[in-house]
Image (cartoon, coloured by chain):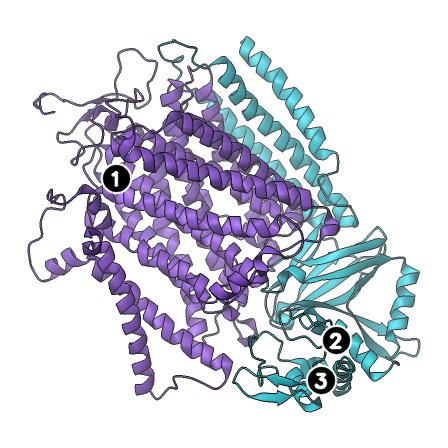
Chain colours: A purple, B cyan
């Protein structure tokens, strides 16, 4: 089996060995310092176990990275040895092995990100389906099953809390990796580069996610955690060992975010093709740039807040425990200072995809390119000044709420610019309804719902009612599906021929769209209504007397339709990756440079540099092109 | 131009339909406080804006899908339109004006909701994993002050109540949907006590729900809220102020209810988060360290005061509050033990 010789498999083995070794190391240190290895008091014993396991898991994560080989070239440089060019491919091995190895090609890394992202979304979705079954009717039923008790060691409401918390954070991990997939795969191709600025850093940024995701998911088997994805202390100080796995997993995925964003920023700023001024970039690059700027500057804060919780749990430093002089609200400030901008990280690339795809299928220029471009930067800028709107009822200083209400409402302005520009782009076009276009239009409508449900949460008086209800859940799912899920499905199908040289199945794509769109509308609108009616979020059960049963059942059905839709999408991709119809040339008649190249994209994207001679989206202007693939002075027969 | 006219008419019709649907009152719970009136007024403004903007964008999209779709066999591109500076400025400035106005009325409604009444009565709300307790100061005609503790939040109608919110462990949140207001409850003593003002204006029974995830028992962390006439409230308070003059076991049952014991321990034999009390007294208990003890008076008293000392096999430490010797009097603890004892007969 070739698989067992891959870097990936070696990394896994190294992680397991490293974890065991690390646990041994911590135990040895404890012995040296004269600390006990167990305690007759159950609470102390659990704490000692936690210290040992956390030490082991950290060493394990590092071992994975060493074992998988992302450091190898850096080690060689440190020893003064030569390394081979980052783009040599060993043709004696089958091509699929590249995806399980440390590869520096941005297209391979993009696909690696994409597949890992889909796997995480599948896990997150499965968790959601499990607790949706529980919520389909009042009364605790399904999750009280003996099977869970045997498998996981717990069931009932604690299992509900764990599944609900994991659904949130695993989806967020999946989305962050999806963003990585989009920017890594697309940015170099769109700006006319052959790779990212720092290919080795890029590989590191991807691979660090793998131990991160494994550790995060392992929390399910280590007692779970019942804090939601926000992990507010003091509750997170009391949660089982699974809490630490959550904190460490997210921490590693955060490292990936920072390293990945450096690459995107530098690549966009320094590696654009000749003649491609910032205002002539494909619009997705603006979204990717705004996203990367947020990731680069805000991610540290969630790392910091999680690190402080870890230290408080491990070493008893009371940062957030108010009974011992800490401040629980401080955590919320640190947490949301990242986690609010982070939601714009999740949506900006998706909005970029919408702006990128609309002109191609409408056959019209993107309406107000500059305004759309700057609105991305506008959203990114405002995102840093709105975090405390998550804390209107938290008990922070009451006067602080007013400025945050103003800043939050301002988000509506750049977002509004995007909507009006999209609507104007559609106006008087010649719209073609291929599956990616259906998903793009679906994304606009769904994101619109996410947009208009924002202001009631922004004005404090109405938020007093809505905070921590299902209305927030509905609003958030609207923004995530409109800003990420629907656009990324559109993007994967749109660039599918570039990745594989083959076509997805159009009929299946259309069916997938209607399944997901109808299912999602059922799901999210019911979430919004339930929230308005006063149903609080994060509860495992609800009182039958409230009369929510039929709505909850319909909500569950909607959720399952979305889940099933995503499975259809995955099937469409997997099946047609090797078996689809061959897709030759410029499938969508796009002006973008990558479509002027063969499918699938050649190893070196552009073996001769092209020159930008026009505007990216001048569809409908006769005799105009965006790029000249054979600029004067080069040999036009090169490809 | 005809296109714009049709779209305009459709937007107006759709806005009216959707706005009326959203503001007709079915979408929010019963209105049971003074504050809810102000808040619902603001909700209605939001609903009209939602109706307008959803209609505007969706009508344009739907109209474009139908009218500007590519007909069969049609070739070529759409109408070449790059953008329009004036239009862009307009749809930037107009939303700025709207959101600024929204923020201003947002501030006004907030100050209205939080307006202080100097005659407000004070109730201390104590939240713990996973129970609610309400404490009222009562001064009798003789000038003796005592504290009434209740597991139901009884409130007089048309009288502002100042709720002082305390937590004993983690963050909880006070939420009565019918009152429309919410406030997180923080642990950490006087410095972290937060206040919430509400003026109930409708008699009835409502549910107080913990709105901040607080662990395993979060779902069931609910308490009853009763809004009654002022006179009825007074007489209820005086009745409660009288000492517990029932038997020990009956008083113990009352304390077990008031102080949240029954949030985790059941009296019917089912095991929730903690061991059941039914048939506990006088029987063998297997502990997590493998030993076995008999559940006698001493064992029960120790378990109340220092719950981590002996953990029953299959349950977790650190779940039960460890400060009951401060909260409860020695007599109350004895009465709770007596109540548990009575459950084994």
Residue to which mark 2 is pinned: B256
Q: Residue at x 42, y 58 (%)?
A: A302
Pointers 3 and 1 in contact (C-beta within 8 Å): no
Element under disc 1: helix
Element under disc 2: helix
Lateral position of residue B85 relative to residue B201, left or right: left
Q: Residue at x 22, y 31 (%)?
A: A600
Whole-number angstrom distance, CA of label 2 to CA of label 3 = 16 Å
Q: Where is residue A109 in the image (x, y as percent from the top left)?
A: 25, 45
Q: Circle 3: is it few (<14), some (14-19), or many (20+) Cα within 10 Å? A: many
Residue to which mark 3 is pinned: B281
Is residue A173 among what the camera can see? yes
Is A507 placed above or below B302 here? Answer: above
Is B231 placed above or below A322 here? Answer: above
Residue under mark 3: which chain is it in?
A: B
Element under disc 3: loop
Is residue A417 among what the camera can see? no
Lateral position of residue A619 relative to residue B114, left or right: left
Q: Nearer the viewer, residue B303 or A589?
A: B303
Pointers 2 and 3 in contact (C-beta within 8 Å): no
Number of numbered labels in the structure image: 3
* Among the 4 quarters of the image, the one containing residue A502: top left
Residue under mark 1: which chain is it in?
A: A
Nearer the observer, disc 2 or disc 3?
Answer: 3
Lateral position of residue A323 relative to residue B119, left or right: left
Q: Nearer the viewer, residue A499 or A455?
A: A499
* Among the 4 quarters of the image, the one containing residue B245: bottom right
Q: Nearer the viewer, residue A621 or A88?
A: A88
Q: Tell me the number on the disc at residue A269.
A: 1
Q: Circle 2: is it few (<14), some (14-19), or many (20+) Cα within 10 Å? A: many
Q: Earlier in the sequence, mark 2 or mark 3?
A: 2
């Amino acid at each position: 089996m070739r698989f067992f010789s891959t870097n990936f498999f070696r990394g896994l083995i190294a992680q397991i060995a490293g974890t065991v070794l690390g646990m041994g190391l911590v135990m040895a240190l404890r012995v040296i310092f004269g600390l006990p290895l167990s305690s007759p008091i159950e609470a102390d014993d659990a704490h000692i176990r936690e210290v040992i396991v956390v030490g082991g898991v950290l060493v394990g994560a590092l071992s994975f990275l060493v074992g998988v080989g992302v450091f190898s070239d850096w080690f060689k440089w440190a020893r003064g040895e030569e390394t081979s060019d980052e783009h040599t491919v060993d043709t004696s091995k089958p091509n699929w092995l590249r995806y399980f190895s440390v590869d520096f090609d941005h297209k391979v890394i993009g696909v690696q990100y994409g597949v890992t992202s889909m796997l995480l979304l599948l896990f997150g979705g499965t968790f959601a389906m499990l607790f949706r079954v529980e919520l389909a009717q009042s009364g605790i039923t399904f999750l009280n099953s003996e099977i869970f008790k045997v498998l996981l060691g717990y069931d009932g409401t604690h299992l509900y809390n764990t599944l609900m918390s994991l659904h949130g954070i695993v989806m967020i991990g999946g989305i962050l990796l999806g963003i990585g997939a989009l920017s890594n795969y697309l940015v170099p191709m769109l700006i006319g580069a052959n790779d990212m600025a720092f290919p080795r850093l890029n590989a590191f940024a991807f691979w660090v996610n793998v131990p991160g995701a494994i550790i995060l998911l392992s929390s399910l088997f280590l007692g779970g955690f019942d804090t939601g994805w926000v992990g507010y202390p003091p509750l997170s100080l009391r949660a089982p060992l699974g809490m630490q796995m959550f904190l460490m997993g997210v921490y590693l995925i955060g490292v990936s975010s920072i390293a990945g964003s450096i690459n995107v920023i530098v690549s966009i700023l320094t590696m654009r093709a000749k003649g491609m001024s910032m205002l002539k970039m494909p619009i997705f690059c603006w979204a990717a740039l705004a996203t990367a700027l947020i990731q680069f500057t805000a991610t540290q804060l969630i790392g910091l807040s999680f690190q402080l919780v870890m230290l408080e749990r491990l070493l008893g430093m009371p940062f957030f425990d108010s009974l011992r002089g800490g401040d629980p609200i401080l955590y919320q400030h640190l947490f949301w200072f990242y986690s609010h901008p982070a939601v714009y990280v999740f949506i900006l690339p998706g909005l970029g995809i919408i702006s990128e795809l609309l002109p191609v299928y409408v056959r019209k220029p993107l309406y107000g390119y500059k305004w759309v471009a700057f609105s991305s930067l506008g959203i990114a800028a405002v995102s840093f000044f709105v975090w405390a709107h998550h804390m209107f009822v938290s008990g922070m200083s009451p006067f602080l709420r007013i400025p945050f209400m103003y800043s939050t409402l301002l988000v509506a302005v750049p977002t509004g610019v995007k909507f009006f520009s999209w609507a104007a782009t559609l106006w008087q076009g010649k719209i073609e309804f291929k599956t990616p276009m259906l998903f793009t239009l679906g994304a606009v409508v769904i994101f619109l719902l996410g947009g208009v449900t924002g202001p009631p949460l922004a004005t404090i008086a109405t938020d007093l009612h809505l905070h921590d209800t299902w209305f927030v859940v509905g609003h958030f799912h609207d923004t995530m599906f409109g800003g990420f899920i629907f656009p990324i499905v559109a993007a994967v199908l749109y660039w599918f021929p570039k990745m594989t040289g083959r076509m997805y199945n159009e009929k299946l794509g259309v069916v997938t769209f209607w399944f997901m769109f109808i299912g999602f509308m059922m799901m999210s609108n019911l979430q919004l209504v339930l929230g308005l009616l006063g149903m609080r979020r994060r509860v495992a059960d609800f009182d039958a007397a409230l009369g929510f049963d039929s709505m909850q059942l319909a909500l569950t059905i909607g959720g399952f339709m979305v889940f099933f839709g995503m499975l259809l999408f995955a099937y469409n991709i997997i099946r047609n990756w090797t078996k689809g119809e061959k897709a030759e040339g410029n499938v969508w008649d796009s002006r973008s440079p990558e479509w002027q190249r063969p499918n699938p994209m050649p190893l070196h994207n552009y073996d001769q540099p092209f020159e930008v001679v026009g505007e990216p989206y001048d569809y409908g202007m006769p005799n105009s092109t965006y790029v000249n693939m054979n600029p004067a002075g080069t040999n036009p027969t090169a490809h | 131009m005809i296109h714009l006219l049709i779209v305009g008419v459709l937007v107006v019709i759709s806005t009216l339909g959707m706005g009326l649907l959203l503001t007709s009152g079915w979408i929010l719970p019963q209105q049971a406080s003074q504050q809810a009136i102000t808040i619902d007024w603001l909700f209605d403004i939001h609903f009209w804006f939602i109706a307008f903007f959803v209609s505007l964008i969706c009508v344009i999209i739907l109209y474009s899908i139908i009218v500007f779709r590519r007909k069969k066999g049609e070739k070529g591109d759409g109408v070449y339109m790059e953008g329009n500076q004036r239009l862009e400025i307009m749809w930037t400035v107009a939303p700025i004006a709207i959101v600024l106005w929204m923020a201003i009325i947002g501030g006004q409604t907030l100050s209205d909701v939080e307006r202080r009444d100097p005659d407000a009565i004070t109730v201390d709300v104590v939240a713990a994993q996973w129970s609610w307790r309400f404490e009222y100061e009562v001064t009798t005609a003789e000038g003796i002050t005592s504290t009434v503790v209740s597991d139901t939040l009884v409130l007089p109608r048309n009288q502002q109540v100042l709720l002082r919110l305390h937590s004993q462990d983690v963050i909880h949140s006070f939420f009565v949907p019918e009152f429309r207001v919410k406030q997180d409850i923080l642990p950490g003593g006087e410095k972290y006590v937060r206040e919430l003002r509400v003026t109930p204006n409708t008699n009835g029974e409502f549910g107080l729900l913990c709105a901040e995830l607080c662990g395993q028992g979060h779902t069931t962390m609910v308490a009853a809220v009763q809004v009654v006439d002022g006179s009825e409230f007074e007489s209820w308070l005086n009745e409660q102020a009288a000492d517990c003059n029932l038997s020990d076991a009956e008083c113990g049952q009352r304390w077990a209810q008031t102080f949240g014991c029954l949030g985790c321990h059941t009296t019917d034999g089912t095991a929730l988060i903690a061991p059941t009390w039914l048939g506990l007294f006088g029987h063998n208990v297997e502990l997590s360290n493998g030993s076995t003890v008999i559940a006698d008076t001493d064992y029960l008293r120790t378990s109340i005061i220092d719950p981590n000392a002996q953990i029953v096999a299959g349950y977790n430490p650190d779940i039960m509050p460890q400060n009951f010797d401060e909260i409860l009097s020695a007599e109350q603890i004895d009465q709770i033990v007596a109540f548990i004892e009575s459950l084994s007969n």
